[in-house]
């Protein structure tokens, strides 16, 4: 396995998403390179607010968590883009081919939704969790 790019959390704009085990495992194995959220008022507001946090010095990251357990496994990916599929509100900060295939077998809904395209996996580092040099 290739070494992951390490990014400090302070330099990232992180979108935390909780997944069912099936979808988490597929993404972890590299079978699924995208995630979906229904185009509801809740997700429109949440994604709009997340998008507004970007600056030239932050990296857009999607951090997945496998369920709601306190010690649930996590993994993070660079976010290549978000677009609205079959919706009325255009929402994309990167261009994506309009003629892509739909993937209902990966949980993609057949109603208006957000398509979150994942890039490479990254490792997020926390400065407070790094070991301090011994004296």
Image (spheres, grey):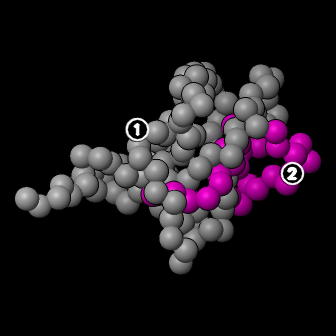
Q: Do the residues labelled 1 and 2 touch (CB within 8 Å)?
A: no
User: Magenta segment: does it hold 9?
Assistant: no
**Which one is in front, 39 or 132?**
132
- Part of the protein shown in magenta: 95-123
Residue 84 against residue 66 in the figure, above or below: above
Residue 123 against residue 112 in the figure, above or below: below
Q: Which residue lies furthest to the front in this view?
A: 135
- Looking at the image, residue 101 sits to the left or right of residue 70; the answer is right
Q: Can residue 58 be seen in this view?
A: yes
- Looking at the image, residue 134 sits to the left or right of residue 109; the answer is left
Give the residue drawn at x 76%, y 37%.
94
Nearest-to-viewer mark from 1 and 2: 1
Task: Say whether disc 1 or disc 2 marks the residue closer to the N-terminus.
Answer: 1
**Which one is in front, 22 or 123?**
123
- Looking at the image, residue 82 sits to the left or right of residue 78; the answer is right
Residue at the spot of label 2:
100
Is disc 2 placed on a helix, strand or loop? loop
Residue 61: quarter of image: top right
Q: Can residue 14 be seen in this view?
A: no
In percent of width and height, residue 70 lies at: 27, 51
In percent of width and height, residue 128 lies at: 24, 46
Residue at the spot of label 1:
10
In percent of width and height, residue 71 lies at: 28, 56
In percent of width and height, residue 105 lies at: 71, 60
Give the residue drawn at x 34%, y 57%.
72
């Amino acid at each position: 396995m290739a070494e992951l790019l390490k990014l400090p959390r302070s330099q990232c704009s992180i979108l935390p998403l909780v997944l069912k085990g099936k979808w988490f495992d597929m993404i972890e194995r590299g079978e699924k390179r995208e995630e979906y959220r229904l185009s509801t008022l809740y997700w429109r507001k949440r994604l709009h607010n997340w998008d507004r946090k970007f600056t030239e010095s932050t990296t857009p990251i999607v951090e997945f968590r496998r369920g709601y357990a306190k010690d649930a496994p996590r993994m993070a990916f660079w976010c290549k883009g978000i677009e609205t599929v079959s919706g009325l509100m255009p929402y994309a900060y990167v261009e994506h081919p309009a003629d892509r295939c739909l993937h209902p077998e990966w949980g993609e809904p057949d109603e208006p939704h957000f398509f979150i395209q994942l890039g490479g996996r990254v490792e997020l580092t926390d400065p407070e969790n790094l070991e301090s040099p011994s004296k």
